[in-house]
Image (cartoon, grey):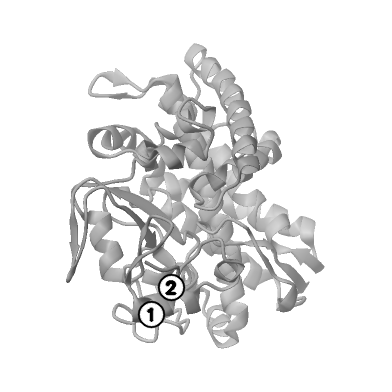
Amino acid sequence: MSTLFDPRDPAVRTDPYPVYRKLRETDPVHQSDFGFWVLSRYADVDAVLSASGVSSEFYRSQSWTERRGGPDSPLVTSVRSWMLMLDGPAHRRIRAVIGKVFTRAAVDRLRPRVAAETNRLLDAVGEGPTDLIADLALPLPVTVTCDLLGLLTEHRDQFRLWTEQISRVIDPAITVEDSAEMNRAETEFREYVKEELDRRRAEPREDILSLLAHAEVDGVRLSDHEIIANILFLFVAGHETTVNLIGNGLLALLRHPDQLKLLRSNPDLIPGAMDELTRYDAPVQIVSRLLDEPVGLGEAVLPAGSKAMLLFGAACRDPERYPEPDRLDVTRGAVKNLAFSGGPHYCLGAALGKMEAATVLRELLGRYRGIEMVDEGELRWRGNVSFRGLESFPLMLKH
């Protein structure tokens, strides 16, 4: 065993792609010395996501649970009901309800609201220096999720803080301090949403929270615990993927001015470019799975009882899947990628996240003739290795 891939390595946060390339070329089914099989090829990652006998219920791992406060901690208790962490009938039961939130019609109804909020934020920015993350990418998805659920947007800053604290739950490199912070945030979040849920049960409204409060699957309602846990999951998933897609996507375009120019001259290409931008620098880089049964990957067999770390970022740059994978090509087309997972756990909110990011890009390019990085050398990547995104992104905007 060796450590070709160490998620704690700062270089993995700054630029993981050289590490991914080395893994794919020299040890694609890599048995690390920290207890995981690390998979970096598209075919292998896709196979595990779709295989039977593979579980996403990582809370069953004692070491995983203990690092997050133990089996009875608020966070682990919540995670046990997250749609992301459930398999089989339990997963399908929650997904059947949450899926009603993300229909194509629901996403289409949100387009005017997303555009209006994007322009409100850009009006506040005006011209000159700004931070794309703090001033636009962070507040937008939290506001949209509040609107979607029927929660007060006036409290979006508090929701954003809770979400940022809890989102490290799937990070393989969390600390004891991270765990304590996440558990405090989960408790506060749960208390807030429980009060809102009680109001909807007493007086239903025309919002998604009311729908969840009264929804049934096979004649059985979701419990308050299940609803609150999955509302938290919606905030975490929507926040992380959208913020990172906006930041990573614009950074990729600024580093490839020919592609930015192409989108600026033909805005109708922007929605289709979202698949390529998510592929090129995936907002979700790593997920993990437990193997309850052996899984064959070519000549390699991962034994039952193993833990697998799936490198989405590496799979999205696999040359066996994508010609010239390190080249950004916004006209590449809608070639399937794994940036939003795959198999039964494909992200329900993928269409919404891509719509939000496309709206931001369209409004930015339509409003500003000049979008420049202030200092690329000062870019800081967040510490969460599972979700790849910038802490801040200083820009200079010119009308």
Q: How many numbered marks does the figure carry?
A: 2
Residue 180 is left or right of residue 36, and the answer is right
**In the rendered image, which quarter contains the C terminus?**
bottom right
Residue under the point 44% across and 35% down: 79
* Type of amino acid under label 1: Arg
* Type of amino acid under label 2: Glu
Residues at marks 2 and 1 touching, judged by CB atoms closer than 8 Å: yes
- Quadrant of the image occupied by residue 359: bottom right
Residue under the point 32% across and 73% down: 28
Asked if residue 133 is positioned above or below residue 55 in the image, the reply reads below
For the question of whether residue 359 can be seen, the reply is: no
Which residue, given by chain and number where applicable, does mark 2 sit on?
276
Asked if residue 325 is positioned above or below residue 196 in the image, the reply reads below
**In the rendered image, which quarter contains the N terminus?**
bottom left
Q: Position of residue 176 (x, y in %)?
A: 61, 41
The foreground one among 252 and 386 is: 386
Classed neighbour count for the residue bearing mark 2: other residues with Cα under 10 Å, few (<14), some (14–19), many (≥20): many
Residue under the point 45% across and 20% down: 224
Alpha-carbon span between mark 2 and mark 1: 7 Å
Q: Position of residue 283 (x, y in %)?
A: 50, 61
